[in-house]
Image (spheres, rainbow, N blue to C red):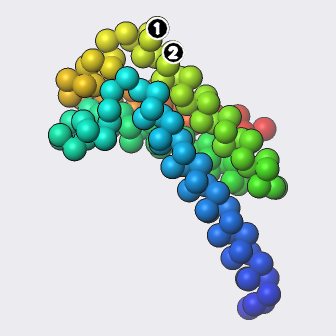
Amino acid sequence: MDWFAFQTGAIAFIIAFAAAVVFFVAFKYVYQWVTPYHERDLIRQGNTAAAVALGGALIGYVLPLASALSHTVSLAEFAAWALLAGVIQIVAFIVVSRFVYKALAARIEAGEMAAGVYLASISIGVGLLNAACMTA
């Protein structure tokens, strides 16, 4: 085993992982700020629809984040793709909740699982498309 190569790779891994975690946490807070309901409170109250919707948004963001980690060569390039992925995910929520399915927020607040699963599915689908576009 080449110890020097391992150290170099491990340092790069730690930096990339830390950057990804920072973007993930930032996305979570921005996404929760954009939604008209309070996921944290709803989830604490046992609202499964809110948990599923938020989980789908987070998975939908992590998919392109992982793709960006795999396909970029610099931290700056990764950051640009991570930022774009977050914007796309938030725009998708805004479009769906304000134009396509106007009662979505109220239904999630009411704990309706169909609405939570629908939003999670949209978020994951957008994330998959976003990730696939980054590979080109």
Q: Please tell me whether mark 2 sits on a helix, a strand or a loop.
A: helix
Q: Residue at label 1? A: 99
Q: What residue is rendered at 42% in x and 16% in y?
A: 97
Residue 114 appears in view = no
Q: Which image quadrant: the C terminus?
A: top right
Q: Quadrant of residue 63?
A: top right
Q: Residue at label 2? A: 95
Q: Nearer the viewer, residue 110 or 33?
A: 33
Q: Quadrant of residue 98?
A: top left
Identity, as a three-letter code, of the amino acid under mark 2 = Val
Query: How far from the left and from the top, in percent, is residue 41?
Result: 26, 38
Identity, as a three-letter code, of the amino acid under mark 1 = Phe
Q: What residue is rendered at 37% in x and 23% in y?
A: 36
| Mark 2 → mark 1, Cα distance in angstroms | 5 Å
**On screen, 18 above or below 7?**
above
Left-right relation of 130 to 99: right
Query: How far from the left and from the top, in percent, is residue 23?
Result: 59, 48
Q: Nearer the viewer, residue 118 or 44?
A: 44
**On screen, 70 above or below 32?**
below
Q: Quadrant of residue 84?
A: top right
Tell whether label 1 touches label 2 (CB within 8 Å).
Answer: yes
Q: Which image quadrant: the N terminus?
A: bottom right
Left-right relation of 51 to 45: right
Q: What residue is rendered at 17% in x and 40% in y?
A: 45
Q: Nearer the viewer, residue 56 or 19?
A: 19
Query: How far from the left and from the top, in percent, is residue 115?
Result: 30, 23
Residue 38 appears in view = yes
Q: Please tell me whether mark 1 sits on a helix, a strand or a loop.
A: helix
